[in-house]
Image (cartoon, rainbow, N blue to C red):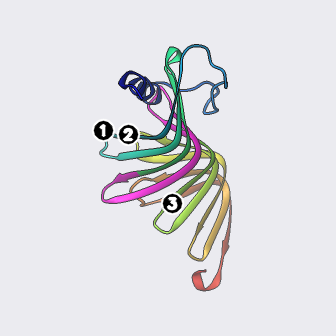
Amino acid sequence: MSPRALGGLAVALMLAGCRGGGEPAPAQAPGPTSVFEGVEVVGEDPDGTRWRLQAARGVGREAEATGSLEGVAGTLTRGGRTLTLAAGAADAATSGEIRLWGGVEVHSGGYRARAARATYRRGEGRVVSEDPVEVEGPGLTVHGRGLEVDVEGRSVRVLDGVRAVLRRGGS
């Protein structure tokens, strides 16, 4: 893997977004395409959030300055707390957001939130989704639409259509 190709992928992932609002770019995009196995991208945001994304595969399209990751696992750390996430795929938008899709899971403080798509809003320290969501934790399952998770783990909010199921014994 050449430094130029790796640099092209990093630029594609961090500075640009892919077409279709978080959906993968066309399979046969024009121009040179670089494919990498075992990709890791790290960064720190102005608000102090440190993030790390690891992916089974990365695809960068240099001519379009776009790229995406496949088979994503990551961490977001701020204030001594770590939030973990997993998704089928991810890319970075020009706004600085990191978009995740393909079955997103966010884990924080013993709770797991699931949605089809979500976005990490860099600089805000939040993971958000407008999709139907499910949040599970000790003794509780919540279904609804829309999600906000604070990176420091202080809050997990389901925004609309909340339906909660409480279980005895916390299991």
Is residue 79 shown in magenta?
yes
Determine which of the numbered discs, if any, sits on residue 107 in the image. Answer: 3
Q: Residues within 10 Å of mark 2 (few under 14, many from 20)?
A: some
Q: What residue type is labelled 3?
A: His
44 over 35 or under it: above or below? below
Of the numbered discs 2 and 3, the one sitting upstream in the chain is: 3
Rendered residue at 38%/39% (across/down): 123
Please indicate whether residue 56 sits to the left or right of residue 40 in the image: right
Q: Where is residue 91 in the image (x, y as percent from the top left)?
A: 53, 34
Q: Where is residue 114 in the image (x, y as percent from the top left)?
A: 62, 56
| 2 or 3: mark nearer the eye | 3
N-term mark: 1 or 2: 1
**Disc on the earlier residue, 3 or 1:** 1
* Depth order, front residue of 33/10: 33
The secondary structure making up most of the magenta span is: strand
Q: Could one spot residue 160 in this view of the protein?
A: yes
Question: As rendered, which of 108 and 64 lies closer to the eye?
Answer: 64
Q: In which quarter of the image is the N terminus?
A: top left
Residue at image mark 2: 123
Residue type beneath disc 1: Pro
Indicate which disc residue 46 carries.
1
Residue type for callout 2: Gly
| Residue drawn where x is 50% and y is 29% of the image | 93
Label 2 and label 3: CA atoms lie apart by: 20 Å
Mark 1 element type: loop
Give the structural element (helix, strand or loop) at label 2.
loop
The Cα atoms of the two marked residues, 3 and 1, are separated by: 23 Å
Query: Is residue 3 or residue 63 the one in the foreground?
Result: 3
Q: What is the C-alpha distance between the residues marked 1 and 2? A: 6 Å
Disc 1, disc 2: CB below 8 Å?
yes
Location of the C terminus (image quadrant)? bottom right
Q: Which span is picked out in magenta?
A: 76-100
